[in-house]
Image: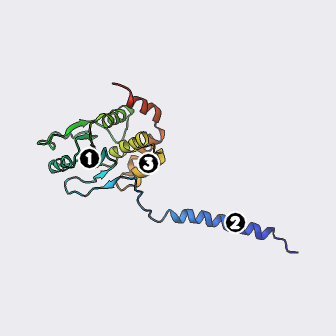
Amino acid sequence: MIDSAPIRYAALYVFIALIFSAHVFAQDFPRLRPMEWGQSIINAHVCNFFKVDEKVYRSSDPDMKGMKVIESMGIKNVLSLSYFLGDEYEAQGTRLKLYRVRMNPGEILDEEVIRALRIIRACDGPILVHCWYGADRTGCIIALYRILNQGWSKEQAIDEMVNGGYGFRSRYVNIIRYIKDADIEKIRDQVIAPE
């Protein structure tokens, strides 16, 4: 009679090796963009422009023509997260309601995040959230918006922020760490608390 134990162990090792290599191998191939991620809007005057959902859009810093474009799309509010630049000049001649929360991408603070999310929650009609590039600070606020308002996990929101084609810059690993460590219930309570 042939001892089948070595054959069983060999088969088990092959199976484990196949599973491991399939996982590693699959990481090298691009995946399809999930439908729930932001949908690209192509416009020459609004770069890195995406529709997040019916209420929220994201982009880089729009120019004057860009502000007119977003107003013509029915967007009524603009939230700038830029530290140095406001939107007053670019929005001249529009009826857009402007908001600003100055954020430093190298140091994300709860107070700034809460203020930005409160503005998004309270505004009447669609809002465009932007910073200079529309990648890092904007990505942080949109990720937390997804978690608080759409029930996404932190992992799902970070995946979209980093891999969604928004230009997230790897030097801002602090933003990923901030989202991972964020006390979501505390932030939610402060966002919905009356002012």
* Quadrant, the N terminus: bottom right
Q: Residue furthest right?
A: 1
Q: Residue at x 38, y 55 (%)?
A: 164
Residue 104 sits in which quadrant? Answer: top left
Q: Is residue 72 left or right of residue 52?
A: left
Within 10 Å of the Cα at label 1, are there few (<14), some (14-19), or many (20+) other Cα atoms?
some
Secondary structure beneath disc 1?
loop
Please state the horizontal and vertical placement of residue 133, each as a whole percent of the image: 28, 49
Please state the horizontal and vertical placement of residue 81, each as a whole percent of the image: 28, 40
Q: Is residue 26 above or below residue 65?
A: below
| Mark found first going from the N terminus, 1 or 3 | 1
Q: Which residue is mark 3?
A: 158
| Mark found first going from the N terminus, 1 or 2 | 2
Q: CA distance from mark 3 to mark 2?
A: 34 Å
> Which kind of residue does numbered mark 2 sit on?
Tyr
Q: Which residue is mark 1?
A: 132
Please state the horizontal and vertical placement of residue 137, each as a whole percent of the image: 33, 43
Secondary structure beneath disc 3?
helix
Q: Which residue is mark 2?
A: 13
Q: Is residue 186 above or below residue 179?
A: above
Q: Does residue 71 appear in this view? A: yes
Q: Does residue 183 appear in this view? A: no
